[in-house]
Image (tube, coloured by chain):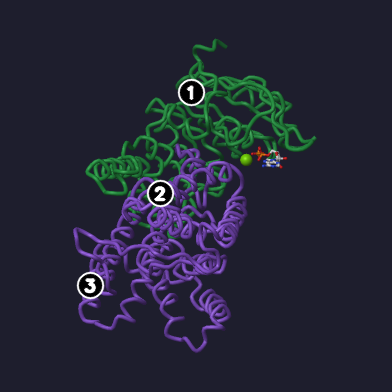
Chain colours: A purple, B green
Amino acid sequence: MKKKTFLLLLFILTMAVGIVIKNPFILNMLSMAALTVIVVTGLNLLLGFAGQISLGHAGFVALGAYISSLLSVKLGINPWVAIFVAVLASSLFGAIIGYPTLKLKSHYLAMATLAIGEIIHIVVNNYVELTGGPQGFSGMPMLSLFGFVLDNETKFYFFIWPVTFLLILLSINLVESRFGRAYKAIKSKENAAYAFGVNVHMYKVFIFTVSVFYASLAGALYAFYIGFISPSSFGLTQSIDYIVMVVIGGMGNFFGIFFTTIILSVLPNILTSIEDYWPIVNGLLLIFAMMVIPNGMKRLFSWIK
Amino acid sequence: MDKVDAIMSIENVTKSFGGIKAVNNVSFHIKKGEIKALIGPNGAGKTTLFNVITKLYSKDEGKVFFLGKDMENYKPYELIGLGISRTFQNIQLIDEMTVIENVMLGYHSKMRANVADAFFHLPKNKKAENEAKEMAFESLKFLKIEDTANKFPHEIPFGYKRLVEMARALCIQPYMLLLDEPAAGLNESETNRLLKTIFRIWEQNVSILLIEHDMNLVMNCSHSIVAMDEGRKIAEGPPSYIQNNEDVLKAYFGK
Ligand SMILES: Nc1ncnc2c1ncn2[C@@H]1O[C@H](COP(=O)(O)OP(=O)(O)O)[C@@H](O)[C@H]1O
Ligand SMILES: [Mg+2]
C-alpha cells in the first residue's frame, strides 16, 4: 500500500472516531495528541531523515505559544495573524540558530538546541511581568474559522486533525522528492551528498527551520486551544519525549511515529495513578522498544511503501 | 603538455594529515577523452588526491584546474554541475534507498523542482521525478543491471554495488568520471566485465581518471598512467613505460 493511501484511510478513521465519540475528555486527549503529532512529525524530518538531533524542541513549541499569545493578549492582534507572526518569527529564529551551528559537526546542534531550549524556559519562567512566570499566562481568545468559533472539544478536534494530516502529507511529499533522497544521503553518506550536488549545510538549515515551523505552529495552536500556557509544559522533559517518540516510532517511519506518538501522549492521561512515575515508565518503554523491536516500528509498517 | 588539451590539470598539490604528507607536490594533466590511471601501493595517497580534487578535503598547496577553471572557486557540491562525477572506494550507497533511488540521487543536481514543488507535490515535481527515474533507469541499463532497480543495496552482490555506484555517477552524463578502485573486491569475470564497461563509458566521450590497484586492469585499459608512492608521483607515462619502470617496480615489490 502507498503511504498516501494509508494516510487517507487513517484520516477517514480519525474523522469517524470524532463522529462516534462524544466524550469531551477523550476528544480533548486526542486533540492534544494531534498537537504532539505535529511537533514529532517535524522532528522526524530533522532527526529521522536528515539525522540531526534537537534537544530543544519544546523550547520552539514554547516560542510559538508565547509569542502568539502575547501578541494577541497584550497587543490585541487577531489570533490568526498572531499565530502567523509567531510561527514566522520562531522559524526565522530557528534559521538563525541553525545557520552557524549546522556548519559544525552534528553534536553542536544538539548542544546549541539544548542551551536554547533551556534559555527559553528560563526566560518565560523569570520574565514574570510579561509572561506571568511559573503562574502561567492566559486570556487568549477562542480561535474562530469562517465565523465558526472553535469553542468546544468536538469543534477543535475537527479542526486540528485535518491540519495534522495536512502537515503529515506535506512531510511525506517532501521525503518522496529529490529532497528526501538528499536528506537520506546527508544522514548516512554525507560525502555522496556533496558529490551529487547537495549543499549539505543549507539543506540542514532548511530542514531544521521546517522542524521549528512545525513545533512553533503546534505551540501556537495549543495556546489558543487551551487558553492557558505555563513554562512547565515546555521543558527538557518534553524535548526528550519528542525524541523518544521519533526513536520508538522508527526514525523516519511516518506511521510508526504517528501511532507511537498517539499512544505515548494518551497513556499518561489514562494511567493517571502512575502520573508521578511517568518518566520512569517512559524510560522503561524506550528500553523495551529498543530491545524488543530493534527497528522501532519499522517492521510493523514495512508493508506501506 | 598544453593546458588547452587538458580537461583537468593538477599542479603541485600537497595535502598533509598531521605530520604525514599524504599527497606531496603532485602534478599531472588528464587529456580530454583519455583514460588516465592512478596507481600505487596502499597508502600512496591516491584516494586523498581524489578527495582533494573533489574538494571533500581542502589542500595545503597547489592548484587544480578543470577546463581552465580554477577549482579553488568551487564548493564540493558544485563540481557535479561542472560535469565531474565520481565513485567511492568505500561504497557510499544509501542503505535505506532502493538501487534506482540511489541512482536518482546522481541526477539530483539536474532536477529543477524546488521545495515548494516538492512540499505541495506540484506538476513540476512529478515531471522532475519522472525524468530522473528515466535517466536513472537508462544508466542502470547501460551497465546492464536494470533488474536490480527495485532492490535495496543489501540485497545485491558486492560486485553489483560497485556498478550501482558507477550508474549513479553516470546518471548526469558527466564530462569527467573519477573511479576509485572500481575493481576492488571483484572476481575475475566481474573484473573483465568492468574493463569492457570502462571502455564503453569512454566511448561516450567521458574522460576518466581511474584509481586502480589491479595492475593488469590498468595496463589493459589506460592510455596513460601516473604512479604514486608515499604521497609522491614517481613516474608517468604509457603502460609500456610504467610496466618496466624501476621505481614503480620497487614501490610495488619492495625496496
Ligand atoms: N582523513 C584522513 N585522516 C588522516 N589520515 C588520512 C586520512 N585519509 C588518508 N590518510 C592517510 O593518508 C595516506 C594516504 O591514504 P590514501 O589516500 O587513502 O591512500 P591510497 O588511496 O593510495 O591507498 C595514508 O597514510 C592514510 O593513512
Ligand atoms: Mg584508496
Q: Is residue B153 visible?
A: no
The subunit letter for the residue under badge 3 reads A
Q: Position of residue B187 (x, y in %)?
A: 52, 50
Q: Is residue B217 visible?
A: yes
Q: Is residue B12 left or right of residue A70?
A: right
Report the amino acid beneath label 3: Met
What is the CA distance from the residue labelled 2 to the residue labelled 1?
33 Å
What is the CA distance from the residue labelled 3 to the residue labelled 2?
32 Å
Q: How busy is the neighbourhood of tag 3: few (under 14 within 10 Å), some, or many (20 plus)? A: some
Q: Which residue is mark 2?
A: A181
What is the CA distance from the residue labelled 3 to the residue labelled 1?
64 Å
When asked about the image quadrant of residue A219, the answer is bottom left
Residues tagged by mark 3 and mark 2 found on one chain of the structure:
yes
Q: Position of residue B18 (x, y in %)?
A: 77, 38
Q: How busy is the neighbourhood of tag 1: few (under 14 within 10 Å), some, or many (20 plus)? A: many
Residue sitting nearer the eye, A168 or A149: A149
Q: Which mark is residue B34?
A: 1
Q: Which mark is residue A15?
A: 3
The subunit letter for the residue under badge 2 reads A
Q: Is residue A218 left or right of residue A117?
A: left
Q: Are marks 3 and 1 in contact (CB under 8 Å)?
A: no
Q: Which residue is pictured at 47% across the width and 55% down the height?
A: A46
Q: Position of residue B133 (x, y in %)?
A: 30, 45
Total labels: the figure holds 3
Find numbered disc 2 in the image and state the secondary structure of the residue it sits on.
helix
Disc 2 within 8 angstroms of ligand 1 (CB): no
